[in-house]
Image (tube, rainbow, N blue to C red):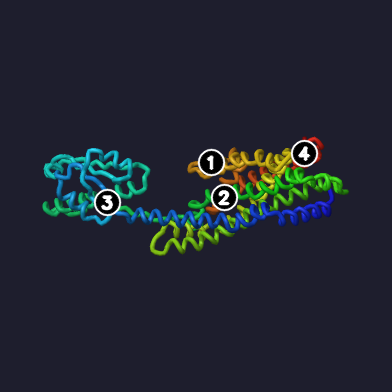
Amino acid sequence: MNLGNILTVYLKELRDSLRDRRTVMSMIIIPTLVMPLLFFVVGKVATGVFSKAKNEVAAIMVIGAENSPGTVAALEASPRLRIVPLTNDWKNQISEKQVRAAVEIPADFDATQERGEAPVVLMYSYEGELKSRLAVNEVEKILEQTRHDRVQAELSARGLPAALVEPFTIKWENVAPPEKVGGNKLGGLVPYMIIILCFTGAMYPAMDLTAGEKERGTMETLLCSPVARVDIVLGKFLMVLTSSLAAMILSLTSMGLTFAFAGRIFSEGKGAAAAETGGSMAMIDPMGVLWVLAMVMPVAVLFSAVLFTVALFAKSYKEAQSYVAPMIFVVIMPAIVGMLPGIDLNARLALVPILNLSLVCKEMLSGVWHWQYIAIIFGSTCVYAGIALALAVNMFKREGVIFRV
């Protein structure tokens, strides 16, 4: 192995890759500009849709309106609700989103309460539909206020204190430090994004430097040079690794700046949730971010080596795509599992590739340091990466793989 030859091959591949539009798109343009722009646009649209739905006057129907004129009057007084005439197909109208909700007031509603009984008010909605849920929330808030006013009036009439039905109040206060709060909110998303970016950043260079060169007929020219096979494969591998890390770092930097500015923009009058997200980015433990980047390094090596090996078997760029594209699902599934609540890091999961990175990154971003697990994860991932890199070198030395027909 000659470090000078490896560096020569690496710089040659780097120059060629920077001249290739596909590589520049996957390594620089998409991570730096396209993905943050998509996040910004989607966030802006989502904020606008939610704000519009929240400010919409929801049409509702009241079943048994004659049973409690006072309750109906309270519903009519709300600026967010509009009572429409009741029809026989009210259930279908809710399903068709023509009406957002319906309220059923039981017979003798007021008289039943006068007797000391507790009648049941039923609310009908379209479960999972945003505008229907907002309408039900508004109706529920009005009914709760009506019930509270009635209770207070009854207590006052009997000369009883208001605290009789509410002897104490409940308040909550956060005791976790800001970095743990921010890490808990975004700790699952950040490693997921890192994993996907590392993988996709290595995909196109890996295919171009193997199957692409076979298709263009430049692989034979490179193999005829007085450079050992191991130097060639390591030089190419370093180029794939560079692309993977560059795509990840550029994308995270760009998205971090996007979230910071977007949080301020969305928080102007509306979009408190977006402001909360932007604040969470600022509250993530900086030391955790640095350790996440350190933990990503062997995973990037693993991805680069595996993609290089798989793409090496293909005879053409198109064939390499058919081999590599399904692998993204193998990468996504463990990353998604790591985002699920209740999945905690332990010694057994610390040996599972990708999942272990997702779990430990979530902990580190929250300021929690399980050093024994960190050591196990880093060590095991380095072993996996070493095996994958050794396999890539071995495959590149086989004539049957390089010149497969």
* Element carrying mark 3: helix
State left or right for residue 186 relative to residue 98.
right
Q: Residues within 10 Å of mark 3 (few under 14, many from 20)?
A: few
Cα–Cα gap, marks 1 and 2: 13 Å
Q: Which residue is mark 4?
A: 395
* Element carrying mark 2: helix
| Image location of residue 187, percent across then percent down | 52, 51
Q: Which residue is mark 3?
A: 141
Cα–Cα gap, marks 3 and 1: 37 Å
Closer to the N terminus: mark 4 or mark 2?
Answer: 2
Q: Residues within 10 Å of mark 4 (few under 14, many from 20)?
A: some
* Element carrying mark 4: helix
Front-lying residue, 12 or 289 = 12
Closer to the N terminus: mark 3 or mark 1?
Answer: 3
Q: Amino acid at mark 4?
A: Met
Q: Amino acid at mark 3?
A: Lys
Q: Residue at x 81, y 40 (%)?
A: 397
Q: Residue at x 37, y 43 (%)?
A: 128
Q: Amino acid at mark 1?
A: Val
Q: Residues within 10 Å of mark 1 (few under 14, many from 20)?
A: some
Closer to the N terminus: mark 4 or mark 3?
Answer: 3
State left or right for residue 232 relative to residue 69.
right
Q: Residue at x 70, y 49 (%)?
A: 205
Q: Which residue is mark 2?
A: 193
Q: Residue furthest front?
A: 216
